[in-house]
Amino acid sequence: MLFPFAPRPNPAEYPAHSMPAETPSHTPSPSPCRVVLLGGDGLLGSAFRQAWSGHPAFELKEFPRAELNLTRPDQIQQTLDRTPFDLLINAAAYTQVDDAEVQPDLAMAVNAKAAGSLAELCAARGARMVHFSTDYVFDGLKTEPYTEADTPHPLSTYGRSKAEGEALVAAASPQHLIIRLAWLFGPGRDAFPEWVLHQALRHDEIRVVSDKSGTPTYSMDVPRWVQALLSGPASGLVHLVNGPPCSWLEYAQGVLHAAAARGWPLRTTEVTPVPLSSLPGLTATRPVQSALDTSLFTRLTGIAPRPWTEAMAQHLDSKQPPA
Ligand SMILES: NC(=O)c1ccc[n+]([C@@H]2O[C@H](COP(=O)([O-])OP(=O)(O)OC[C@H]3O[C@@H](n4cnc5c(N)ncnc54)[C@H](OP(=O)(O)O)[C@@H]3O)[C@@H](O)[C@H]2O)c1
């Protein structure tokens, strides 16, 4: 079943042979897709807000945590029952990986049970649902990037709650997209690049873990990728990251080089490698290799996600360097 709107792809990301034909000018515009966005104040959700509010293809309705708390099944049902919508974007989640070890019930309630309830409500009204998950559903023992065919084996409570959420969404909704992301950065909330910049602006040495690898993802690229997936009949599980894979150390070096090239007054651009085992305060076990393979996404849409270094340059261009 095709989704009832036709988003315009970004020509820069489509190879010429796969560009959809231009819509003839006499074709009436389809009505906008009515979207409910949860988690709009988060790192990912704010990217959807920025990309889709005011967009002619979408009519966005947001419910922040104060209006729809995912720990309150009654509130989820009542709020969605009185809201007409065609598509639900669930960018809300319990994302504190270490805190989840001491709050497993809360992590499970938000990331698993509530996700399943949302999927049931979407299925009951024939709405489509986009739900987000994580590379932390894997144990990191694979040496190659993980594909959608690999079996999750989470090492942490957060990872288990997200894997359980995936399973509940898939079981409840026939029209779902479960998108696994990793290592998000972007405007709105500080993430790894902001920590690196903070350190390099204040210290002569930065110590970063070199024996953990994954795939950085620019939050502002995700809405466009999701829109491309929604324009087709795709349903199921898809990995979406910028790539190529890198270690935390290489990620930090990429941030510093981009900032130095833009004249940021850094005290250092050198990074000292340290092992993951030396990091204090990590209560959750993390996968040491959790890069995600995006070839399924490219087969479905014709889009090859751009390198994270290019996206990082754009991210830093949107920031004000300190005086
Ligand atoms: N960040 C990453 O590196 C990363 C990596 C892989 C996958 N992901 C996945 O990507 C998705 C988005 O992550 P993110 O980094 O954007 O998260 P985030 O910045 O922590 O934002 C999470 C959002 O969820 C909302 N929320 C939390 N508990 C809630 C509750 N009980 N009821 C309603 N809303 C609640 C938060 O509300 P408040 O605004 O009130 O706090 C916030 O808006 C998640 O599914 C996450 O698992 C993230």
Image: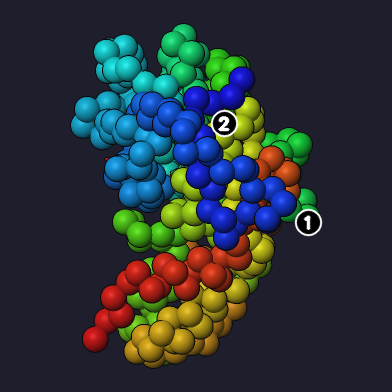
Is 152 on the left-hand or right-hand side of 223? Answer: right
Which quadrant holds residue 319? bottom left
Name the residue at 49% across, 54% down: 221
User: Is residue 322 visible from the viewing direction of this image?
Assistant: yes
Secondary structure beneath label 2: strand
Residue 178, how many percent across, how many down? 57, 33
Q: Position of residue 277 (x, y in %)?
A: 59, 64
Q: Earlier in the sequence, mark 1 or mark 2?
A: 1
- Which amino acid type is shown beneath numbered disc 1? Thr
Q: Residue, x 48% and y 80% (percent of image)?
A: 258
Local secondary structure at mark 1: loop
Disc 1 to disc 2, how far (Cα)?
Answer: 26 Å
Identified by mark 2, the residue type is: Leu
Q: Nearer the viewer, mark 1 or mark 2?
A: 2
Q: Nearer the viewer, residue 262 or 141?
A: 262
Q: Nearer the viewer, residue 281 or 222?
A: 222
- Point 58% across, 38% down: residue: 229
**Ligand 1 placement by image quarter:** top left
Looking at the image, can residue 94 be seen? no
Q: Is residue 55 above or below residue 173?
A: below
Rate crowding at label 1 as few (under 14), some (14 to 19) or many (20 or more) other CA atoms within 10 Å.
few
Quarter holding the N terminus is top right
Q: Position of residue 143 (x, y in %)?
A: 78, 56
View extreme (left): residue: 66
Crowd class of label 2 (few under 14; some 14 to 19; many from 20; radius 10 Å): many
Q: Residue 166 bears which disc, if any?
A: none
Residue denoted by label 2? 177
x, y percentage for residue 262? Answer: 41, 85
